[in-house]
Image (cartoon, rainbow, N blue to C red):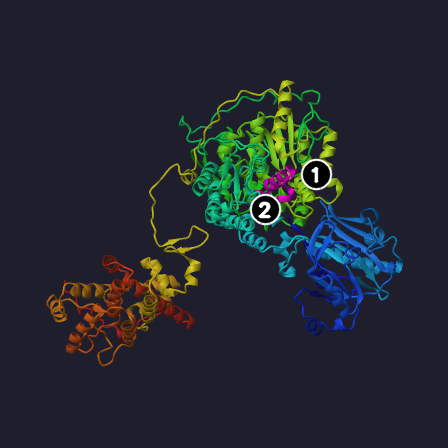
Amino acid sequence: MSAKAISEQTGKEFLYKYICTSAAVQNRFRYVNVTAETDFERLARDHPWLLVERLVVKPDQLIKRRGKLGLVGVNLDLNGVREWLKSRLMKETTVGKAKGVLKNFLIEPFVSHKQDEEFYVCIYATREGDYVLFHHEGGVDVGDVDAKAKKLLIGVDEKISEDSVKKELLTHVPNDKKGVLASFIVGLFNLYEDLFFTYLEINPLGRNQNNGVYVLDMAAKIDATADYICKAKWGDVEFPPPFGREAYPEEAYIADLDAKSGASLKLTLLNPRGRIWTMVAGGGASVVYSDTICDLGGVNELANYGEYSGAPSEQQTYDYAKTILSLMTREKHPDGKVLIIGGSIANFTNVAATFKGIVRAIRDYQVPLKEHEVTIFVRRGGPNYQEGLRVMGEVGKTTGIPIHVFGTETHMTAIVGMALGHRPIPNQPPVAAHTANFLLNSSGSTSTPASSRTASFSENRAKAESSPAKKAKTGAPIVSICNCFPFPVAKATTLFSKHTKSIVWGMQTRAVQGMLDFDYVCSRDEPSVAAMVYPFTGDHKQKFYWGHKEILLPVYKNMSDAMKKHPDVDVLISFASLRSAFDSTMETMQYPQIHTIAIIAEGIPEAHTRKIIKTADKKGVTIIGPATVGGIKPGCFKIGNTGGMLDNILASKLYRPGSVAYVSRSGGMSNELNNIISRTTDGVFEGVAIGGDRYPGSVFTDHVLRYQDSPGVKMIVVHRGVQDLGVLVYWHLCHHVQFGHAGACANQASETAVAKNKALKEAGAYVPKSFDELGDDIKSVYDDLVAKGVIQPAEEMPPPTVPMDYSWARELGLIRKPASFMTSICDERGQELIYAGMPITEVFKSEIGLGGTLGLLWFQRRLPRYACQFIEMCLMVTADHGPAVSGAHNTIVCARAGKDLISSLTSGLLTIGDRFGGALDAAAKQFSKAFDSGMLPMEFVNKMKKEGKLIMGIGHRVKSINNPDMRVQILKDFVKQHFTSTQLLDYALDVEKITTSKKPNLILNVDGFIGVAFVDLLRTCGGFTRDEADEFVEIGALNGIFVLGRSMGFIGHYLDQKRLKQGLYRHPWDDISYVLPEHMSM
């Protein structure tokens, strides 16, 4: 829900900080918060006014009518406040039907005033603008303000003025008070707009004789989706739970997961001791399941409300599922417990992938699940759902947990009746076709296939005259409407046809490919997507498939270029983010050719949405969304991911038109309606999901009236579940819990589901009792219309086939292909980076350091701590050896030539070889071969001399036996102290004795020392076999130590030259010996 209540303290803090008015707002920032942990002595020191003023104390926990409930202490001193709190602080209290603990109080200065100095002010948002309510008699006895108060509507994008406030609102206020009050109300309204409030009530608002105003009691809600706009002013806002419902740490944990994810993860605990738990995919479906549970008598046992949607990863689903399983296995229930894992038919979520996370959680909790006698019921549809259901069924067999699995062949909420014992559990539910039931066109033709169905006999007929069919049973959430009911006639508007062309805003290649596949299977002559707009790249072409032929679609950086080059486009599908959706939509409406805009983004601030609606109404543009999957017109056009993947489009017969049109709020539920309508009628004519926000761009009646005026539509189904079912569940639970989308709320009696359904029934609509009965009622009405000849079903023809994407076929496990690369050291695909089987969090927790990390990535081993330290020491001693060596010299010359860091570093690294820095591997190989063959040190020296070969790792230009290399000495001391064996090092030191006896600088240098010591490490640390140790030496692993270490020095030289601003290097002539021949003989 976007509109969230804030505490009175937060609301007043915003007001005191940011209100701009000539009225003198009194007692600014003079309030303190009190909890059970408050130290009153310190509180008095920090706020000395508490000791000298009379005070008011009241709970700050979203409780209404505190004065009438005796929850306000007035005209007290600080000791009186403490006494008053003793009987209330941390005590359980009943407010209405809600029980809760009073734990948070607000203390403010007491303001003495007369009754005629109390006023009532309220501002709240509606679709058409913001209403300002004012009543000249405020306070606890204000009564029905809707009936009493003066109202002033400030339309969207309109400004409030003091004159209009005085004229419309302050008619009963004495003239000497009008100026101050008008200025305050104008300032309050501007604050309301600037900080994206959706509701702001002050009762009472006090005024004293000195033209000052006092904000005595305040209640407010802000639009939480505007956080990215108001963060600087809001700061970190805390949204307290409604009174009577505790804030659980698990809810905060899921909220944190949700904030870090592009998916949607929600959890609200209603009754942690309840036996009925849900894990539902989709906001709309979550409402339907909750209502069905309540409808079947499970309201008192419903433990939670929540949803996961938006294609969460396996890890995110696992974290969500384990949280729910942990909660439900803390207390046993005498009747056991049930877990309903439900959902509608997904549009784009890979069901099998999300189920993997749930299966992992079930395996982890299998013991407590069996101890608590948990039975699990699963129903799901969508991409790859068959594999997901198979895996879910398998885990039930292997763990012994009773898990009953159902797919799209089973009505969505049927598992609720099974779980609650109201309907039998079938032994073998019908098996739906496999996801991959469409493959290549058998004809091999690249041409667009012919139409797959003869036109419906009802499509070209005039509106049939018939009497109303027999009414269905009345009830709550869904309305099925026949075309013969007396709706007002509106001008016919066709949003989509077989020739509709669109532009897609955003690089949503998967959605575009889905649209093209739909076009192809519908036998369209041309793709419905003419171009894409993506402002973050230059103009280019993007490759897609038309059938199994590759085509190119243009991608434009600027909207204006796309519109100019594609004048036949009249639909824009916006995948812009919530931050950019407003600006891009307003820009789109500047082009008269656009008649329809679908806004997919969820979380657009309501104030922005209302501005979009106002502009669209002026320009005659139809807005679908925000927070929608879109809509579909079978045989003609589909928006983005609507209808899901091709297997669902074929199964729901969305490739050709039927006779039933529908409008829904929820995208996921629209796919469920596609399934229900295709199973009970001749199919869908058109379907639109208007979106889950409180102010959708177009409303139910907009589309119902369009359908009413369409000759091909013979039935209209309106699914209002997100709004009205949410109200029903709220009524049952007596808690203010947000269900489903932002639109799921009712503000007055006329907006409740009961009132709406009653009115619809009286108007002649068919109103099923619950979602469970929707399919039966639709079938009943459809059969009646067929019997009367209103609908004449057309002959069904087999649909054309479309090639499956390679990536999707591979994900389904239908094909296999040798991988181009293999890796065994790192895996970045999951929730967490893994080094050689070790999660990155564990790498840091274990404090293995850089040496340990190198061990994981180079050697696939968790090395001993001394080995990790030795590696780090090697990197330190090889980091640099001055600017004169060839590698550093090259790096410096390159840097001074103006090259970048990478080029300069590479220039230095290219000098590494046998003569410079590359002796580690060679030394290790030479010494190992000699030692392993049993050759004595003197024999090894003589052999190398006889063959005319240098002993790698022996000799130094500067250092000698008399001027030892301290790097070698440091390493030698460490190795002798920590290595379990140093046989090869000892052998090399014996060789050094022989070579230095001939020449003092023929010492074992740092390269040679590291080479032989590393062989000892690999052979004796216990982590490698002899063959593995020899293999690492053979493939050049030891030279990598020098390369990695010396790279640090080369980078240092590069940065040093840049910092010193050294110019282009030119070698001096006097340091070059020119030896050209004196003459040339011909």
**Image check: 884 left or right of 491?**
left
| Of residues 594 and 1013, the one drawn nearer to the viewer in this rendering | 1013
Query: Residue 733 location, x and y as percent?
Result: 67, 45
User: What main secondary structure does the magenta stretch of the protein show?
Assistant: helix
Among all residues in the image, which is located at the extreme left? 946
Query: Residue 538 location, x and y as percent?
Result: 49, 48
| Of residues 835 and 521, the one drawn nearer to the viewer in this rendering | 835
For the C terminus, the image quarter is bottom left
Secondary structure of residue under mark 2: strand
Q: Write down the quadrant of residue 551 in the picture.
A: top left
What is the crowding at mark 1: few (fewer than 14 residues within 10 Å), some, or many (at least 20)? Answer: many
Point out the stretch of residues depicted in magenta: 282-307
**Image check: 348 left or right of 611?**
left
* Location of mark 1 (residue): 753
Mark linked to residue 306: 2
State the separation of the CA atoms marked 2 and 1.
Answer: 21 Å
* Residue contact at pointers 2 and 1, CB within 8 angstroms: no
Look at the picture and state if 984 lies above or below 298.
Answer: below
Query: Residue 397 location, x and y as percent?
Result: 44, 39
Which one is earlier in the sequence, the residue at label 2 or at label 1? 2
Query: Residue 949 location, x and y as percent?
Result: 15, 66
Residue at 77% of width from left, 53% of height from top?
Answer: 122
Secondary structure of residue under mark 1: helix
Q: Is residue 288 magenta?
A: yes
Residue at 73% of width from left, 47% of height from top?
Answer: 129
Q: Amino acid at mark 1?
A: Ala
The answer to whether one can see residue 574 in this image is yes
